[in-house]
Image (cartoon, helix red, strand yellow):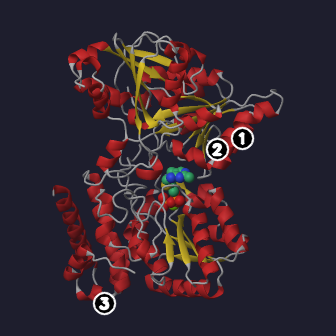
Amino acid sequence: MKNLSDEVLANIEEVVPSWLLRNPNLFKLILIRSTELAFGALGKSGVIRGPIHSSVGQEVVAVAACASLEDSDFMLSNHRGHGHYLAKGGNLTNLIYELLGDDRGCCSGLGGSMHVAELDSGILGSNGIVGAGVPIACGVSLAEKIKGSGAVTMVFLGDGAMNQGVVMESLNLAAIYSLPVIFVCENNQYAYSTRSDDMTKNAYHERASGFGIEATHLQDTSLNQNLKIMEKVVSKTRQKSMPHFVEFFTYRLHRHFETERQRAVDYLLADLHEHRSMNDPVTRECVELGQDESECDNVIAEVKFIITSFAETCVKK
Amino acid sequence: MTYLEILRSAVYALMERDETYLYIGEDVRSGQKGISDGFFSKFGAQRVIDTPISESGFCGMAVGLAVNGFRPIVEFNFSGLMFVCLDQIFNQAFKFKFMTGNKRNVPIIYLMPTGTKGGLAGHHSDNTYATLSHLGVISLMPACKEQIPSVMDYACSANAPVAIFLPVEEFRSDTVYDIADINPFFLRLKCGDDVAIICTGTSISTVNKFFNTASKSIVRRTALYCVSDLNLSIKCLDEIRHLKEKTIVIVDDATEDFGFASQIELEIRRSKQHECPEIYTVCRLSNLVPFREGLEHALRPSAERINEVFLDSGLLGGKA
Ligand SMILES: Cc1ncc(C[n+]2csc(CCOP(=O)(O)OP(=O)(O)O)c2C)c(N)n1
Ligand SMILES: [Mg+2]
C-alpha cells in the first residue's frame, strides 16, 4: 500500500498550467526532464555528491514503458534510473532526499543516484553494475508466476548492457521458463563513449528474437503511439505469461554523467548530436499538443526551480 | 606531474618499447579514464582495442592472446568489476600455465582503479585486492607516482597474470615523496623511532592528512611505511619483519576481516613472537558503503580515527 505524501510534487502541481495537468503522461515527461535538469545543476554545483547519469532526451521511453504498469507490477532499473523511478510512480520528494544523502530518502540516503528504490511502488531498485538487474528481474517474475499473481516485471537495460554475458543468459532463462517479464532496452546509441554500432553487428531486438522471445522495435518519436503499443505489450505479457523484448531507439542529450569532462577529441558525433538537440522529444510533445516551445521551456524552468530550491533549502537546514 | 600522468606515460613507454603489448578495455579508445589518453592515435586500432561491456569475454580473450604471443594490458572501469569475470582471471589466466604442465606463460596486466574519492555508494566504492591476494594472483598497488615505473617493470618481468590496483583517490595527486629505495614492494616514506604507521595506496592520503593535523612530537616520532606488494612476498615480508618500532598502526581502506591488514598483522606476530609490538588497525568497517557523506566518512579510515588510536592508547603523549 502506498502511503507517501509528496511535498515537492504537490508544489509543482500547484504551479503548472492546466493543459499539462489534464495530460498526465506529458506531465510525467516534463517532470522527469525538469528533475534531471535540476539534479544536473545540483551535481555541478556540488550540492549532490557523486556521478549523476541523466536521462534527458530519453523521457519518452520511461513514460511510455511504465504507463501501463500497475502499482503491483515490478520494475528494475539501471544506473540511468531517475526517469524510470518517476515513471513507475516513485515519490519525487524522497528521490530528491535520496540524492542529497538525507535519511528521508527513498533508500534512507544509503544509495544515492545509482541506487533508488521504492518497494511500495514495485520499484525494486536501480543498479550500478551494468546488466546485473536483468537476471534478478527474471527471478522476480518467476516468483510472481509461481504465486499466480498476474503481475508483470519490467527491467530497463542499455544498449551496452546487451553485451554482458549475464544478459544473454537471462534472455534464455526468460524464454525457457516462459516468464512474464518485459525487457526494455534503451538503445541511446552510446555506452559511455562507445558507439553501439561499433560494438554490435546485429540489432538488439533480433538477438532477443534469436532466443525465442517476441521482440518489438520502437522509435522514441511519438509518445502517444508508444503508449498504445506498450499497453498491448504489457497486457499480452500478463495474459500469456510470456517474455517480451522492446528495443527503443533513442538518444541521451547529456553526457554519460553530468560532470563528465569532454576530451580533446570528443566521442559524440557532432551532426547526430545537433540533429537530436534540434528535435528534442519533450518540446516536440508539447508542440504537438498546441503549446509553443517557449511555454514548454518556461514550465520546465519553473519546475526545475522548485526542485532546486527545495534541495538547496534542505542542505542549508 | 600527477599520479595519473605518470601512470599514463609508464604504460605508453611500455607500448612503445614492445609491440606485443596490447591495450584492451571499455572506452580506452577515447581514454575516458585518462590512462590511455592519446594511445589510439599513436598505436592504432590493432593495439588499442575498445571492447563492449563484456568483462568476462574480454578477460578470456586476454588469456588467449597471452598464450599466443601477446601481452595484453586490460583496463577495468573499477576493481569491483572483477566479480563479473573472476573465472577468467583466477580459474583460467592464473591456472593456465599450471594446467598445461608449466609450459606456457600467461603475461597479462590488469589495471584496476580501486576505492573511492567519496560519493560512489554501494557498487563503485570497493577495494577488492584481498580477494586476489587470497587467490594467489600476483597483485601490486603503487601508492605514489614515484613507485609506478618500478611496479610496471616488475609486473612485466613476472610473465604471469598481474593485477595492478590503482587507488582512484591518488589519481590527481602530485604529492612528491623523497624515497631512498624505490621498489615495487615496500616503501620507507618517513623516519621516526617510536611508532610505525603502515599504510597502503588506499590510505596514504588519509595518513598524510593525519600527519598534517597531528602534534609536532607525534609527527617527529612516527615512521611511515607503505606496503605495495599485495601478496606479501618475501621481499616485502623481510622489511615488515625487521621493523624496530614498539607500536605499529596499520591503516588500509579495505575491510579487515580475512583481509589485507589482518594478514600484515599476522605476519608481524609470527615473526616477533617473543617481543611482539603493540598492533592497532584502522580499516574500512564494512563492505556496505553508504552514500550519505557522514556515514561513509565514519566507515572509512580517517585522520580522526587514526588520531583516536593515538589518544585511546596514550601513544606519544596522547592522553589515555
Ligand atoms: C559490468 C559493468 N561494466 C562497466 C561498468 C561501467 N559503466 C557504467 S555505465 C556504462 C555504460 C553503459 O551503457 P548502456 O548500457 O548503453 O547504458 P547508458 O549509459 O547508455 O544508459 C559503463 C561502461 C559498469 N558499471 N558495470
Ligand atoms: Mg547506451
Q: Amino acid at mark 2?
A: Leu
- Chain-order first, disc 2 or disc 1: 2
Disc 3 versus disc 2: distance between alpha carbons? 52 Å
Structural crowding at the residue carrying mark 2, measured as other residues with C-alpha within 10 Å and reported as few (<14), some (14–19) or many (≥20): some
Looking at the image, residue A99 sits to the left or right of residue B35; the answer is left
**Disc 3 or disc 1, which is closer to the eye?**
1
Disc 3 versus disc 1: distance between alpha carbons? 59 Å
Q: Which residue is mark 3?
A: A22
Instruction: Say if B5 sits above or below A232 in the image.
Output: above
Q: Amino acid at mark 1?
A: Asn
Q: x, y percentage for residue B219?
A: 27, 17
Disc 2 versus disc 1: distance between alpha carbons? 8 Å
In the structure shown, which secondary structural element does the residue marked by tag 1 occupy? helix
Q: Which residue is mark 1?
A: B91
Q: Residue furthest right?
A: B101
* Residue at 28% from the left image edge and 84% from the top image edge: A291
Looking at the image, residue A227 sits to the left or right of residue B158; the answer is left
Q: Which residue is mark 2?
A: B86
Q: Amino acid at mark 3?
A: Arg
Looking at the image, residue B30 sits to the left or right of residue B190; the answer is right
- Which chain letter matches label 2? B
- Is residue A147 visible in the rendered structure shown here? yes
Residue A22: quarter of image: bottom left
Tell me whether the residue at label 2 lies in contact with that at label 1, contact meaning CB atoms closer than 8 angstroms: yes
Q: x, y percentage for residue A20?
A: 29, 85
- Is residue B62 visible in the rendered structure shown here? no
Q: x, y percentage for residue A207?
A: 68, 67
Residue A58: quarter of image: bottom left
